[in-house]
Image (spheres, coloured by chain):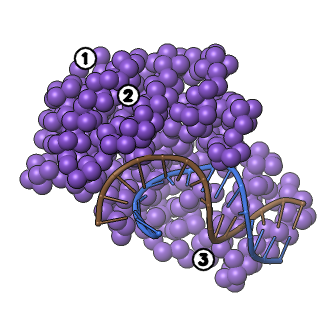
Chain colours: A purple, B blue, C brown
Amino acid sequence: MRIGYACLAIAVPGSEMKSCTLKNASPERLLLLIEHNLNSLQTLIDYNICNNVRLFRISSDLIPFGSSLSAELPWREIFSEKLLAIGQKILRSEMRVSMHPGQYTVLNSPDTLVAERGVEDLHYHASVLESMGLGNEHKIILHLGGVYGDKPQAISRFISRYKDLDPSIKKRLVLENDDRMYNIEDVLGVSSAVGIPVVYDTLHNSVNPFDKAVDNVAWIKACSDSWKKDDGPQKIHYSQQHQGKNPGAHSGSIQIAPFLEFWQQLSGMNIDIMLEVKDKNLSALKCINCMNEMSIAALETEWARYKYCILERSPQHYQKIRQLLREKGSYPALKMYRSIEDSFDLQFVPGNRVNAAQHVWGYFKDKASEAERRRFQTLLQKFSSGEAGIQLVKNHLLRLAEKYQEDYLLSGYYFYI
DNA sequence: TGACGTCAAGATCCG
DNA sequence: CGGATCTTGACGTCA
């Protein structure tokens, strides 16, 4: 049972993906971007290993214009060492990775040019995983595509295009139910016709169900046979509805209580769960730390990252969590994360935000220049009087943290949420 | 033709 | 001029 997150991480310095627009894309520029992004990916993989994350989706933006412009570039050869080194880290840590072309990669389009571009895109994704030396269990997740007014025909077009795919793509391809056109029953039908594993997406199913009376666990069991031995363990996508947004919109964070309830229903099954959520690694670590009894040190590390976020929301919750962590023999993961969630539901009190900003300023007050001190005071004053948002203050503090290399602050969440 | 979703680049505005 | 904020880009389908 592995838990993972998609594509990018919050508060992991040096892990950002870069890109450019089509009109600025020269071969030289693309190669520089690719090199940068591979270094970022390595940073992310290292972060995952250190934080017990063993499931991860690699961003399709790794190679900008990977299926078009960059397909002409010899990036696999130029960066072969780096690619293999990343692959080795993944394999040695027993991490499982995947890739997920977006909703715009459509294999079953009536427009053959669109479908051909889709195939090119799948080639690109497969070649990333191949270049790292990763086996078939490192999957590429795809949606069925459009309907075009005739679902059976659209499905049969998918099937015939699938059959023509290169084996290097086929061996990795996995189908997912989507939130609009193809429900889980549709996808299972295609799966049994051509033998593709199925990723069941819980939120997509709740938005676009085949049968509301069939619950998540039943669908997960229904999908399990589509995973053959060399596909690796069955995978699913789990996310929660963003309250107040469109049905299907991912929540900002995974609420731990409903997640644990869901997870407990899966006991005895070996399932990898990809979380789709805005706060990415934060929710993944939350779930991982609550599912397994780690050392209390793991919670202290988490607390160190959250503390100024909590302080600016609620000094009461801040104190309460500090108390929790004083019990050295205990493992109060659930209580800690519940408290964190509770504090995030509160309305901000400006005085608390000022207080937290001053705590963070404490890291710089002895080394900052006079100009930096004045700027901090001015920005804080402007925030207090309502002339400026808190992000101006935070950004100034972030610049200082970068300048004076306060890694402790940089790997905390305060600047980013 | 806009909405959908996603993220950062690029453009523009501001002091 | 640097930094903050707004707009665009890149993809395809559907209403």
Give the label on residue A229, or none.
1
Q: Nearer the viewer, residue A27 or A257?
A: A27
State the CA–CA distance, disc 3 to disc 1: 56 Å
The type of residue carrying mark 2 is Lys
State the CA–CA distance, disc 2 to disc 3: 46 Å
Whether residue A398 can be seen here: yes
Horizontal side of A321 relative to A187 (left or right) equals: right
Horizontal side of A313 relative to A179 (left or right) equals: right
Q: Looking at the image, which residue is at 54% across and 30% down?
A: A45
Residue identified by numbered label 2:
A139
State the CA–CA distance, disc 1 to disc 2: 14 Å
The C terminus of chain A sits in image quarter: bottom right
Q: Looking at the image, which residue is at 30% across and 30% down?
A: A161
Residue identified by numbered label 3:
A350
Residue A407 sits above or below residue A251 on the image:
above
Q: Chain of mark 3?
A: A
Numbered disc 1: secondary structure: helix
Of the numbered discs 1 and 2, the one sitting upstream in the chain is 2
Residue A181 sits above or below residue A218 on the image:
below
Numbered disc 3: secondary structure: helix
Q: Looking at the image, which residue is at 64% across and 21% down?
A: A74
The type of residue carrying mark 1 is Lys
Query: Percent from the top left, x then y, of residue A328?
Result: 46, 42
